[in-house]
Amino acid sequence: MAVIFPKIVKLRLHGFDKIFTSNEFEISFSNNLSILLGGNGLGKTTLLQCIVYGLTGGTNNIEVEETKLHRWDHTYFKGRINADAYIWIDFLLGEKYLKVKRGFNSPRVLECAMITKNNSEDIIFDQAIIEYGNYNSVNDFSFIINRLLYLPENRRSLLWDYNAQIRALMIINNEFVVEQEYRSLRQLIKLKDSNKRKIGWDIGRIEKSAALQNVKETSNDSKNNSDASAYIENKKDLLTKLKKLTDTSKQLYTKIKSDQEARNKLVQNILIIGDQIRSTESDYLREHLLEHDEKNALVFNKTLKTGYCPSCDQKSDNLKNIIQERIKRGDCLVCGEPISKHQATAANFNSDDLNSQLNEKITARNTLDIQISQSNTKLTQIEEKISTFRNELSELDFGYSDGYTIDENDENESMDFVDEELIAKEYINLCQQEKEFELEIAQMTKQADKMYDIFITNFQTRYEQLHSIYSDLAYKFLGIPVELKFIKSKASFVNMNYLVPHFSNVDRDSSETCSEAQRFFLDIAFRMSLIALNKAISNIDSTFICETPENALDISYIDNVVKMFMTFMQKGGTMVLTNNLQYLGIAQTLIKEAKKQKIKIDIFDLLTYGKLSEIQSASKQLLEIRDAIIKEVE
């Protein structure tokens, strides 16, 4: 089942009067194009961060953001808002209308509700994201928001970050691969290799000591005997701990593999049962549509299949739901009044058993997700402890060897090991562990490469779709043909290709191969292409949230950027953009083109809601540009 990207509907803020002129206000994002219009320091970035914070709580989680530098949470807003501040974010996740409330004492969800026409039902946020969004975890949802759907002020690239790019592709195409399993496998390979290299260093140390053949004591025997006893005792203790941790590591790895296999089976069962439910319901609706309202069956059959209104041809999930409910109740499809001869037919449709099975499988999958995540965390901690103990062992050996002076020229003296039996045993054990690590790394690398190859093979058709979408969007911006090509990444251990733009006969394998404007807007084109691809897979609209890098553009590129944005919206995308008030900016041209295409526009005027500086208040030009833009919308 395709993952569902969110479509932003509304943002409500309370307790922000340190930044804005009002303590509480609401912003609508219900139209295809929403523009946050303002000048420097008026809160455009803060509002975008509020949207993303409301959806995800930030990125202060290694499963969402691996790089510490880029992690953030509620503390981002510290000192700029009131103690009682909170936000509500309303968004659509497919056909589900969700409302989420977060405060700023912690990033946790304070309230979450699902809104229907006549009801508001409290729900668990994490469960709703997984169940209605078809995500394997809430961390995947947060990653998609923060790394794909949101282009922040720092313009961090998705296109040229091969780890983030492949993760996004795998999450979007989650029926082809379990992305978390692939990523965990790669992380484990790195940890195993790190410990293997430390073992190699220890083996080399012992071999070097044995080759030197000579050790000359520099202090009295009683001191050496005392040092030797402490050394042997500490070394035995460390080796015992290492063996215990290594055994635990092997057991955990075996458990993770077993849980992942069980999870994969559950995912297949969930897909099968989901298809059965949809098929059963579809058959039921079609049968009873014809049975009790044959005259209108053909007209409303289109609504049931596509969600489009038979009169105005606009998408209306609300109408689709109304028709479904009227069929089940046996009501007239047009007026909604009961039809007596059909009142009993609703009892014939019973999907309770299938839904019960589905919920059972989903619960089991979610439980396994938690277990796998916990096991991976434990495994990472154990491998880090193993690494720490190996460092301690090396320091112990190095510290003890400092008590001797090595004479390389004296070939007659025999080497005086502190405990030859212990050293020999350690050496054999290290060599055995090194071989085991080599074998494990080879097996895991082979497994990871196989997962990736299967994914790429299954992704081929969608890659062609993505290539077509990207080529179209990028051409609109650059004005020359652009391809999207796979090239080999620099990822350690695994064979992993990723996508880069190719134009003017050059693979643009890093952002440095492009100009500043090309760098930013080719990355934006890639993000919009992935959103459009997901729309093609899921048939669900979603929102791209963009801190527009318009300062990177000269005037000659503005029309091209507008063409690219318009093409994206024509493909069903919706946008929340920021725009600085300046002459010949993107907003004026974009609004004119959007009006021509009858695209509805929301403008949020930060000259009204933001706290203007003295310079801004005194600027007539700022007000003139604002007024001209708003007049275009009216």
Image (tube, helix red, strand yellow):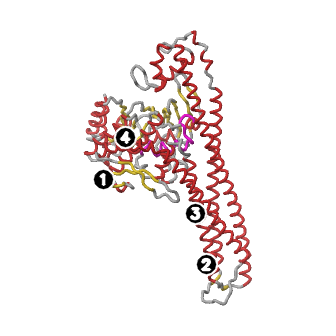
Between 584 and 456, the one nearer to me in the picture: 456
Question: Distance from label 4 to label 1 (Cα)?
Answer: 31 Å
Residue 424's spot in the image, x, y percent? 70, 74
In the image, which is nearer the foreground, mark 4 or mark 1?
Answer: 1
Instruction: Report the span colored magenta.
Output: 131-151
Measure the C-alpha gap from mark 2 to mark 3: 21 Å
Secondary structure beneath dot 4 equals strand
Disc nearer the start of the sequence (1/3): 3
Please tell me the numbered disc located at residue 194: 3
Image depth: mark 1 or mark 3 in front: 1
Task: Kindly state the secondary structure of the residue where label 2 is placed.
Answer: helix
Label 4 to label 3, Cα distance in Å?
Answer: 44 Å
Q: Give whichever of discs 4 and 3 has the lower sequence position.
A: 3
Q: Going by the picture, which residue comes out furthest to the top?
A: 340
Residue 208: mark: 2
Residue 578: mark: 4
Q: Which is more N-terminal, label 1 or label 4?
A: 1
Q: Which residue is mark 1?
A: 504
What amino acid is found at the position of numbered circle 3 in the picture? Ser
Residue 428 is situated, as x and y percent measured from the top left of the image, at: 68, 71
Disc 2, disc 3: CB below 8 Å?
A: no
Q: Secondary structure at mark 3?
A: helix
